Image: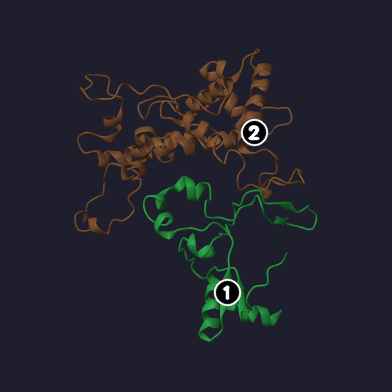
Amino acid sequence: MADDAFARRKFLVGAGLAGTAIAAGVAGPVEAQQPAPAAPAVAAPAPQAPEPFITLTAPEAAFIVAVVDTLIPPDELSPSGSDCGVAVFIDRQLGSAWGGGAKMYRAGPFLKGKPEQGYQLPLAPREYFASGIAATNTWTRKAYGGKDFDRLAAADRIAALKAMEDGKAEFENFDARAFFAQLLSITMAGFFADPIYGGNRDMIAWKLIGFPGLPATYADKVDDYRDRRYAAEPQSIADFS
Amino acid sequence: MATRLKEIDAVVIGMGFSGAILARELTKAGLNVVGLERGADRNPAEEFTLTRLRDELRYVVRLELMQDNSTDTITFRNGSDESALPIRRFGAFLPGEGVGGTGIHWGALHWRFLPTDFRIKSALTEK
């Protein structure tokens, strides 16, 4: 994992193409979902305006956008992480009950445990990300000539995230490696979770990997698809609500 | 002030798999049984049907059906040379809450028995 933060994505490419190539037929779902630039029909909605952040501060939002766009760059597979809604997803999650520490044991003692003893900080996720973002920017300002993470050139962002992932970034009083793991985890959650949570816009991630989404009963399709691969456009919770 | 409730033959604390079977056996034997369970009052028609049933973020990732660690948790350590620390959010094992207990989030996975599983009585006897 340490070798290349993007190996996962390359794997995703292979898996996604394998899935969609068969699923696609003539008009592949991957191509089909690319933003259509031309000829809006009469009733077509205007191009999606960027959704406002309601939890993150402006500097925090800039950081999160920079991180998700580094982990998920725009390429032939998908738009950037933020264009897929991942930053909005993170904003909403941190503003949720979970982000505020619901269902989390938050009393002491607060001791440094072994990794297998799990998370042992008093911070709820919202506070944890605020602290992590501040710690990262403090470190990049020192290591990259006074610049916050989101101001770094693309190559430096990748190098900074790799240094965090490898445990080589020296933060003051904060575990850089653990923070990277949390950033990666919530980015993946945003990319792959149901679009009702703000990420995975247009079910792009599900189309990439050939995941059908909500439907979970296939007994009625057994006869239709005998000896053929089952392929279908994914469906979100919103499609059934 | 304490409320004195009507006397009952048996109270089963925890209405998961074990408690429910126990309560069933006791009622079959003719006893009046009260089952106690903690957690939200869930409506199966709402919670355990599509579309919510497939909400992976809510249930699989955020553990909606699991015990609330904010009010109760356990501590653990892996050896006597360590300090036991609280589990702040469940992860490795997932105790449920609500009527049905683990039964409401049980994934119906049965692992194949290992050779040692067939020697439990022998191993205990040897011990």
Do the CB atoms of the residues marked 1 and 2 lie less than 8 Å apart? no
Query: Looking at the picture, which amino acid does disc 2 mark?
Result: Glu
**Is residue A24 rendered to the left or right of residue A184?**
left
Question: Tag 2, which chain?
Answer: A
Q: Quadrant of the C terminus of chain A?
A: top left
Reading the image, the residue beneath label 1 is B34
- x, y percentage for residue B102? 53, 63
Badge 1 amino acid: Val
Residue A127 marker: 2
Label 2: which secondary element = helix
Which type of secondary structure does the marked residue at label 1 adopt? strand
Q: Is residue A232 left or right of residue A172?
A: left
Q: Position of residue B9 (x, y in %)?
A: 61, 81
Foreground: A209 or B17? B17
Judging from the image, what is the letter of the chain drawn in brown? A
Q: Is residue B27 left or right of residue A210?
A: right
Of the chain colours in the picture, the one used for chain B is green
Query: Residue at the bottom extreme?
Result: B29
Q: Position of residue A134 (x, y in %)?
A: 65, 24
Taking the spot 68% from the left edge, 46% from the top edge, the residue there is A115
Q: Nearer the viewer, residue A241 or A63?
A: A241
The residue lying at 53 percent from left, 70 percent from top is B17
Q: Quick check: can you spot residue A184?
A: yes
Q: Report whether residue A5 is seen.
A: no
Give the number of the disc on residue A31: none
| Chain under numbered label 1 | B
Position of B54 relative to B41 (above/below): above
Image quarter of residue B44: bottom left
